[in-house]
Amino acid sequence: MKCTAIILAAGQGKRMKTKVQKQFLMLQGKPLLYYSLACFQKSDEIQEIVVVTGKESIDYCRSEIIEKYGFTKVKSIAEGGKERYDSVYAGLEACSADTDYVFIHDGARPFVTEDIIKRTKEVAVTYQACIAGMPSKDTVKIIDENNMVSATPERSRVWSVQTPQVFLYSLIKEAHDTARSVSMQGITDDAMVVEQYKNTPVHIVEGAYENIKITTPEDILVAEKILEKIL
Protein backbone atom coordinates (compact mmCIF):
# COMPACT_ATOMS: atom_id res chain seq x y z
CA MET A 1 0.00 0.00 0.00
CA LYS A 2 1.63 3.24 -1.15
CA CYS A 3 0.72 6.51 0.54
CA THR A 4 1.70 9.88 -0.87
CA ALA A 5 1.49 13.16 1.03
CA ILE A 6 0.72 16.33 -0.90
CA ILE A 7 1.99 19.32 1.08
CA LEU A 8 0.42 22.58 -0.08
CA ALA A 9 2.81 25.52 0.13
CA ALA A 10 1.62 27.82 -2.62
CA GLY A 11 -0.49 30.26 -0.60
CA GLN A 12 0.23 33.97 -0.75
CA GLY A 13 -0.59 34.54 2.92
CA LYS A 14 -2.11 38.00 2.39
CA ARG A 15 -3.58 38.08 5.90
CA MET A 16 -0.09 37.60 7.33
CA LYS A 17 0.87 41.07 6.00
CA THR A 18 4.50 40.16 5.38
CA LYS A 19 6.65 40.19 2.25
CA VAL A 20 7.70 36.60 2.99
CA GLN A 21 5.12 33.92 2.17
CA LYS A 22 3.81 32.43 5.40
CA GLN A 23 5.05 28.91 4.66
CA PHE A 24 8.60 30.27 4.60
CA LEU A 25 8.39 32.40 7.75
CA MET A 26 10.91 31.36 10.40
CA LEU A 27 9.68 29.54 13.50
CA GLN A 28 12.34 28.72 16.09
CA GLY A 29 15.03 29.05 13.45
CA LYS A 30 13.40 26.88 10.77
CA PRO A 31 10.94 27.67 7.97
CA LEU A 32 7.33 26.97 8.86
CA LEU A 33 7.11 24.42 6.05
CA TYR A 34 9.94 22.42 7.62
CA TYR A 35 7.79 21.13 10.48
CA SER A 36 5.04 19.42 8.49
CA LEU A 37 7.59 18.02 6.05
CA ALA A 38 9.62 16.63 8.95
CA CYS A 39 6.59 14.82 10.34
CA PHE A 40 5.63 13.19 7.05
CA GLN A 41 9.28 12.34 6.38
CA LYS A 42 9.48 10.54 9.73
CA SER A 43 6.14 8.73 9.45
CA ASP A 44 6.31 5.06 8.49
CA GLU A 45 2.88 5.44 6.87
CA ILE A 46 4.20 7.72 4.11
CA GLN A 47 6.30 6.54 1.18
CA GLU A 48 6.36 9.66 -0.99
CA ILE A 49 5.88 13.41 -0.64
CA VAL A 50 4.84 15.94 -3.28
CA VAL A 51 5.36 19.61 -2.42
CA VAL A 52 3.21 22.16 -4.24
CA THR A 53 4.50 25.73 -4.23
CA GLY A 54 4.51 28.86 -6.37
CA LYS A 55 6.58 28.87 -9.54
CA GLU A 56 8.87 31.55 -8.12
CA SER A 57 9.50 29.50 -4.98
CA ILE A 58 10.38 26.11 -6.49
CA ASP A 59 14.16 26.62 -6.53
CA TYR A 60 14.18 28.09 -3.02
CA CYS A 61 12.02 25.28 -1.71
CA ARG A 62 14.28 22.65 -3.27
CA SER A 63 17.63 24.09 -2.11
CA GLU A 64 16.80 25.80 1.18
CA ILE A 65 14.32 23.32 2.61
CA ILE A 66 14.18 19.93 0.89
CA GLU A 67 17.89 19.48 0.19
CA LYS A 68 19.10 21.44 3.21
CA TYR A 69 17.13 19.32 5.69
CA GLY A 70 17.38 16.02 3.86
CA PHE A 71 13.73 15.37 3.04
CA THR A 72 14.42 12.30 0.93
CA LYS A 73 10.77 11.32 0.53
CA VAL A 74 10.08 14.42 -1.55
CA LYS A 75 9.96 13.04 -5.09
CA SER A 76 8.42 16.03 -6.83
CA ILE A 77 7.86 19.78 -6.51
CA ALA A 78 4.77 20.83 -8.43
CA GLU A 79 3.82 24.33 -9.50
CA GLY A 80 0.74 25.56 -7.69
CA GLY A 81 -2.25 27.27 -9.24
CA LYS A 82 -4.32 30.37 -8.64
CA GLU A 83 -6.72 28.71 -6.19
CA ARG A 84 -6.16 26.07 -3.53
CA TYR A 85 -8.03 23.45 -5.55
CA ASP A 86 -5.77 24.16 -8.52
CA SER A 87 -2.74 23.46 -6.34
CA VAL A 88 -4.32 20.26 -5.02
CA TYR A 89 -4.94 19.11 -8.57
CA ALA A 90 -1.34 19.84 -9.52
CA GLY A 91 -0.27 17.71 -6.57
CA LEU A 92 -2.58 14.87 -7.59
CA GLU A 93 -1.20 14.99 -11.12
CA ALA A 94 2.36 14.80 -9.73
CA CYS A 95 1.73 11.68 -7.62
CA SER A 96 3.35 8.45 -8.75
CA ALA A 97 1.07 6.18 -10.77
CA ASP A 98 1.16 3.50 -8.08
CA THR A 99 -0.17 5.76 -5.30
CA ASP A 100 -3.00 4.05 -3.40
CA TYR A 101 -3.88 6.69 -0.80
CA VAL A 102 -3.13 10.39 -0.73
CA PHE A 103 -2.79 12.73 2.25
CA ILE A 104 -3.56 16.38 1.44
CA HIS A 105 -2.05 18.69 4.05
CA ASP A 106 -1.62 22.43 4.49
CA GLY A 107 2.04 23.37 4.73
CA ALA A 108 0.94 26.13 7.09
CA ARG A 109 -0.12 23.53 9.69
CA PRO A 110 3.23 22.79 11.34
CA PHE A 111 1.96 20.66 14.23
CA VAL A 112 0.55 17.60 12.49
CA THR A 113 1.71 14.48 14.33
CA GLU A 114 2.61 10.93 13.39
CA ASP A 115 -0.35 9.76 15.46
CA ILE A 116 -2.77 11.90 13.44
CA ILE A 117 -1.26 10.55 10.22
CA LYS A 118 -1.65 6.97 11.43
CA ARG A 119 -5.22 7.37 12.65
CA THR A 120 -6.47 9.16 9.55
CA LYS A 121 -4.88 6.52 7.33
CA GLU A 122 -6.54 3.68 9.25
CA VAL A 123 -9.98 5.23 8.80
CA ALA A 124 -9.35 6.14 5.15
CA VAL A 125 -8.40 2.55 4.35
CA THR A 126 -11.73 1.42 5.80
CA TYR A 127 -13.98 4.15 4.40
CA GLN A 128 -11.99 5.63 1.45
CA ALA A 129 -12.29 9.19 2.76
CA CYS A 130 -11.23 10.64 6.10
CA ILE A 131 -10.49 14.11 7.45
CA ALA A 132 -8.99 15.35 10.70
CA GLY A 133 -10.87 17.85 12.82
CA MET A 134 -11.80 18.87 16.33
CA PRO A 135 -15.11 19.58 18.09
CA SER A 136 -15.88 23.28 18.15
CA LYS A 137 -15.22 24.98 21.48
CA ASP A 138 -17.58 27.80 20.61
CA THR A 139 -21.27 28.08 19.90
CA VAL A 140 -21.72 28.59 16.16
CA LYS A 141 -24.40 30.77 14.58
CA ILE A 142 -25.74 30.50 11.04
CA ILE A 143 -26.59 33.92 9.62
CA ASP A 144 -28.64 35.11 6.66
CA GLU A 145 -27.72 37.66 4.00
CA ASN A 146 -28.67 40.48 6.41
CA ASN A 147 -26.31 39.26 9.16
CA MET A 148 -29.26 38.09 11.21
CA VAL A 149 -29.02 34.78 13.08
CA SER A 150 -31.09 32.17 11.29
CA ALA A 151 -30.01 29.02 13.17
CA THR A 152 -27.87 27.74 16.02
CA PRO A 153 -26.61 24.23 15.33
CA GLU A 154 -26.07 21.85 18.23
CA ARG A 155 -22.49 22.43 19.31
CA SER A 156 -21.76 18.73 19.84
CA ARG A 157 -22.30 18.22 16.10
CA VAL A 158 -20.10 21.11 14.95
CA TRP A 159 -16.45 20.40 14.18
CA SER A 160 -13.61 22.58 12.91
CA VAL A 161 -11.96 20.84 9.98
CA GLN A 162 -8.19 20.42 9.77
CA THR A 163 -5.76 18.60 7.56
CA PRO A 164 -4.56 16.07 6.62
CA GLN A 165 -7.50 14.95 4.55
CA VAL A 166 -6.90 11.40 3.34
CA PHE A 167 -8.51 9.65 0.39
CA LEU A 168 -8.28 6.63 -1.82
CA TYR A 169 -6.29 8.16 -4.66
CA SER A 170 -8.61 7.06 -7.45
CA LEU A 171 -11.61 8.49 -5.55
CA ILE A 172 -10.20 11.98 -4.99
CA LYS A 173 -8.65 12.20 -8.46
CA GLU A 174 -11.91 11.24 -10.17
CA ALA A 175 -13.82 13.68 -7.93
CA HIS A 176 -11.50 16.54 -8.89
CA ASP A 177 -11.67 15.59 -12.56
CA THR A 178 -15.46 15.72 -12.45
CA ALA A 179 -15.57 18.94 -10.43
CA ARG A 180 -13.22 20.72 -12.82
CA SER A 181 -15.44 19.78 -15.74
CA VAL A 182 -18.53 21.12 -13.97
CA SER A 183 -17.87 23.80 -11.35
CA MET A 184 -15.45 24.40 -8.48
CA GLN A 185 -17.47 27.34 -7.17
CA GLY A 186 -17.81 27.28 -3.41
CA ILE A 187 -15.33 24.44 -2.93
CA THR A 188 -13.24 25.14 0.18
CA ASP A 189 -11.75 21.75 0.95
CA ASP A 190 -11.23 18.37 -0.66
CA ALA A 191 -13.87 16.62 1.39
CA MET A 192 -16.47 18.81 -0.32
CA VAL A 193 -15.29 17.59 -3.73
CA VAL A 194 -15.79 13.97 -2.71
CA GLU A 195 -19.11 14.70 -1.01
CA GLN A 196 -20.59 16.57 -3.96
CA TYR A 197 -19.16 14.76 -6.97
CA LYS A 198 -18.69 11.19 -5.76
CA ASN A 199 -21.54 11.03 -3.23
CA THR A 200 -19.11 9.39 -0.81
CA PRO A 201 -19.48 9.79 2.97
CA VAL A 202 -16.45 11.39 4.60
CA HIS A 203 -15.46 10.21 8.07
CA ILE A 204 -13.91 12.59 10.57
CA VAL A 205 -11.45 11.71 13.33
CA GLU A 206 -9.93 13.87 16.03
CA GLY A 207 -6.82 15.74 15.04
CA ALA A 208 -5.51 18.04 17.77
CA TYR A 209 -6.31 21.53 18.96
CA GLU A 210 -2.59 22.28 18.52
CA ASN A 211 -2.86 21.39 14.81
CA ILE A 212 -3.51 25.03 13.95
CA LYS A 213 -3.18 26.73 10.59
CA ILE A 214 -0.91 29.76 10.54
CA THR A 215 -2.93 32.52 8.90
CA THR A 216 -2.40 35.78 10.82
CA PRO A 217 0.52 37.36 12.75
CA GLU A 218 -1.17 36.33 15.99
CA ASP A 219 -0.97 32.69 14.94
CA ILE A 220 2.83 32.88 14.85
CA LEU A 221 2.84 33.89 18.53
CA VAL A 222 0.59 30.94 19.38
CA ALA A 223 2.78 28.61 17.29
CA GLU A 224 5.88 29.67 19.18
CA LYS A 225 4.21 28.77 22.46
CA ILE A 226 3.08 25.40 21.12
CA LEU A 227 6.57 24.67 19.86
CA GLU A 228 8.09 25.57 23.22
CA LYS A 229 5.72 23.09 24.84
CA ILE A 230 6.58 20.33 22.37
CA LEU A 231 10.36 20.72 22.45
Image (spheres, rainbow, N blue to C red):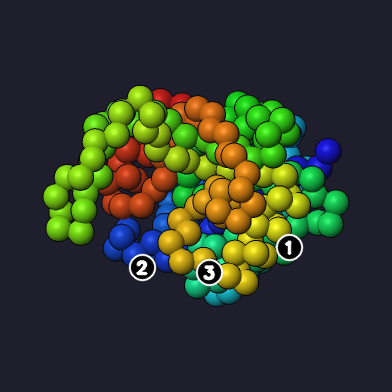
Point out the tag, 2 or 1, that comes first from the N-terminus.
Answer: 2
Task: Determine whether label 1 and label 3 are within 8 Å by CB.
Answer: no
Query: Residue 183: which numbered mark, if any?
Result: 3
Q: CA distance from mark 1 to mark 3?
A: 22 Å
Residue at 23% in and 40% down: 151
In what element is the residue under mark 1?
helix
Type of the residue with mark 1: Ala
Query: Residue 19: which numbered mark, if any?
Result: 2
Q: Position of residue 124 (x, y in %)?
A: 67, 35
- Across the whole image, how many numbered discs are drawn on residues? 3
In what element is the residue under mark 2?
loop
Residue at 57% in and 34% down: 203
Q: Label 1 crowding class (10 Å Cα cut-off): few <14, some 14-19, many 20+?
A: some
Residue at 46% in and 66% down: 185
Q: Label 3 crowding class (10 Å Cα cut-off): few <14, some 14-19, many 20+?
A: few
In what element is the residue under mark 3?
loop
Q: Is residue 106 above or below residue 230?
A: below
Q: Is residue 105 above or below residue 230?
A: below
Type of the residue with mark 3: Ser
Point out the tag, 2 or 3, that comes first from the N-terminus.
Answer: 2
Relative to 213, 97 lies left or right: right
Q: Which residue is mark 1?
A: 94
Residue at 64% in and 52% down: 198
Type of the residue with mark 2: Lys
> Considering the image in quadrants, where does the N terminus appear?
top right
Mark 2 or 3: the one toward you: 3
Q: Label 2 crowding class (10 Å Cα cut-off): few <14, some 14-19, many 20+?
A: few
- Camera-side residue of 204 and 41: 204
Q: Position of residue 13 (x, y in %)?
A: 39, 61
Q: Is residue 6 above or below residue 223?
A: below
